[in-house]
Amino acid sequence: MNETLSCQLYLISPLNVGGDFPLRLTEALGTGDVAAFQFRVKDADPEEAARLAEPLQAICKDHDVAFVVNDDVALAKNLGADGVHLGQGDTSLRSARAELGKDVQIGITCHDSRHLAMEAGEGGANYVAFGAFFPSQTKETIYQPEPEILKWWSTLMEIPCVAIGGVTPENCKPLVAAGADFLAVSSAVWNDNDGPASVIEKFQAAIGSV
């Protein structure tokens, strides 16, 4: 990890992680500039989800990258994942903490809400996520906060904040300047014709120039 950068990358998987995706993940993590990877696969039964997750988790371990499961506390526990990310409609933070223990990182989606973020922070979340800051190819954009919410949070709290939603190397600088600790990125990395390593290098150049 590039310790000189105050903001780091948090990769989120595409919905399809079969085929050559493990090779693409290996390429992305080989840059040495990714802090965490979120396994986000929908509508797979528990056995299939575990089968898809295990090789990706091993790649993350090899590269010293945190492996985070989206939404599914049971899967996170089964895999011994480093963390779980919860939306507002998912398992409660209290229940997840009771199930997973104190050492597992738990992140909470807070949309554009200062109130939800404060609740998450006071409830023991390890990070809060705000967004979508820009229109996203991954999810429908319902909430769209201003970068100022990152500045407010980082001034007030020591718990890290994640900026999510349509983040690209071209538009990320205001989020970094406002105090984002992590940029959650998905489509920008996986859908680029030049390959994930090239995009991550562009992100690092943008972050480093702020």
Image: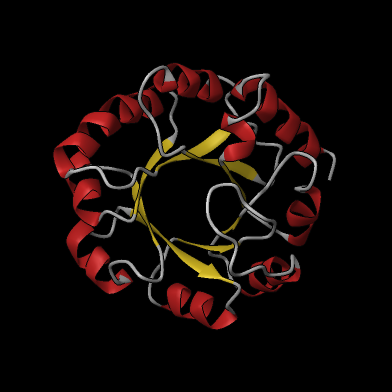
Quadrant into which the N terminus falls = top right
Residue 34 appears left or right of 70: right
State the scheme by which the image is colored.
secondary structure
Residue at 61% across, 32% down: 189
Residue 147 percent across, percent down from the top left: 74, 65
The residue lying furthest to the right in this view is: 209
In terms of depth relative to the viewer, which is nearer, 70 or 148? 70
Give the quarter of the image for residue 115.
bottom right
Estimate the x, y position of residue 94 in percent, counting from the top left: 27, 73
Using the image as rendered, state which of residue 26 and residue 181 is in the foreground: 26
Say how many tags the image has: 0
Q: Residue at x 53, y 64 (%)?
A: 159
Q: Quadrant of residue 113?
A: bottom right
Q: Is residue 97 left or right of residue 39?
A: left
* Residue found at x 26% / y 65%: 97
Could you say which quadrant of the image residue 81 lies in? Answer: top left
What is the x, y in percent for residue 95? Answer: 23, 70
Give the camera-side residue of 13 and 105.
13
Looking at this rendering, what residue extends furthest in the bottom direction?
Answer: 115
Left or right: residue 200 versus residue 83 is right
**Image x and y of residue 13, in percent:** 45, 38
- Image height check: is 71 above or below 110? above
**175 relative to 137, above or below:** below
